[in-house]
Image (tube, rainbow, N blue to C red):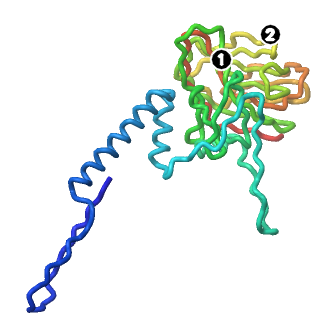
Amino acid sequence: MAHTDEVNQKGSGNTKSPKKSKEKRGISPAGWAAISAIGVAAVGCIGTIVAAVLNPDLAQVILDKAIGSTPTPAIISTVSIPTSSPTNTPPLSTNPTDTPEPPIIASKDWEADCISIANWKPDLENETAEIYNDCYDLVPWGIGANNGNLLFTTTSNQTISAMEYGIFTPLPQNKEFHFSIQIKTLNNSEVWIGFFDQNSLQSKGILVAIQPDDNFDIREMPSQVEFADNIHLYSEAGDYENIQIEFIGSSLYVTVDGQPILAGYPISISPKKLFLGYRMLSDGEIKATIRSMEIRKK
């Protein structure tokens, strides 16, 4: 927006006839009006394009970030998923006493509205993900980080057998996994919380699938054989607080809202990767928020 400065001329007290002041060169008011009109039109076009292309429920998050940041970050690279693995190599130190800062631990990057390439690896069915300032842009797949939370918000109006999208992060040994989740909409979809040998849904693992109607399934992967089926929980407005998943030796324990779901189930793997994502069928819709995520070493 253009601004004009008001210039107040005060008398100097000199009785001599004032000299004609030289005309100040600049842009006329009409010129500023034209420039302002062009600027408004450009902003309107950008807003229309963003709203039309991005996921409608996550578009406002991106617009808010773009309006509040100057300048808009440029794309620094594009990666292929899953054939390439992102790396985070710190720059060479110019001072012998400098030490590179350790990466922010998984889920803490969400506080900066970032899915950090240092912590996460997307699983996007051989599609690609753009990177902005060391953060993945997963909005086209309905995944975003905002205010310390991970959001799943998307719909599918096409005929598909199934699609699975999500992100992997390494797990420490002797771990407990804690989180809360709010389910607003879950039609023909499941929220997946998985523990795998590798950064792949086709590797050996354990999957906790949150289904519509307050049902939980626990499955072995990749066969998806169910060893705990249709566990029904009574939640208030789709809120599940303090979900705890714990591995003790070769056994699995799951507790939701203080209610044991699974206790001492024997497993044949030592999970090394955590997966957060979803599965969607045709005409599916999902609106879910994972919050208060914490990975603890015992």
Q: Quadrant of residue 81?
A: top right
Disc 1 marks a residue whose amino acid type is: Arg
Give whichever of 159, 198 is nearer the camera: 159
Distance between the Cα atoms at labels 1 and 2? 16 Å
Residue under the point 48% across and 28% down: 53
In what element is the residue under mark 1? strand
Location of residue 21 with respect to 188 vertically, above or below: below
**Which label belongs to residue 158?**
none
Location of residue 298 with respect to 190 vertically, above or below: below
Q: Quadrant of residue 25?
A: bottom left
Q: Position of residue 56 (x, y in %)?
A: 47, 27
Question: Does residue 185 appear to the left or right of 245 in the view shown?
Answer: left
In what element is the residue under mark 2? strand
**Which label belongs to residue 225?**
2
Q: Is residue 290 visible?
A: yes
Give whichever of 258, 98 is nearer the camera: 98
Quadrant holding the C terminus: top right
Give whichever of 228, 152 is nearer the camera: 152
| Circle nearer the viewer, 1 or 2 | 1
Q: Position of residue 8 (x, y in %)?
A: 18, 74
Q: Position of residue 172 (x, y in %)?
A: 83, 38
Q: Residues within 10 Å of mark 2 (few under 14, many from 20)?
A: some
Disc 2 marks a residue whose amino acid type is: Val
Q: Is residue 259 visible?
A: no
Question: Does residue 84 appear to the left or right of 134 in the view shown?
Answer: right
Q: Which residue is mark 1?
A: 279
Question: Does residue 148 appear to the left or right of 217 in the view shown?
Answer: left
Give whichever of 225, 57 is nearer the camera: 57
Q: Quadrant of residue 20?
A: bottom left
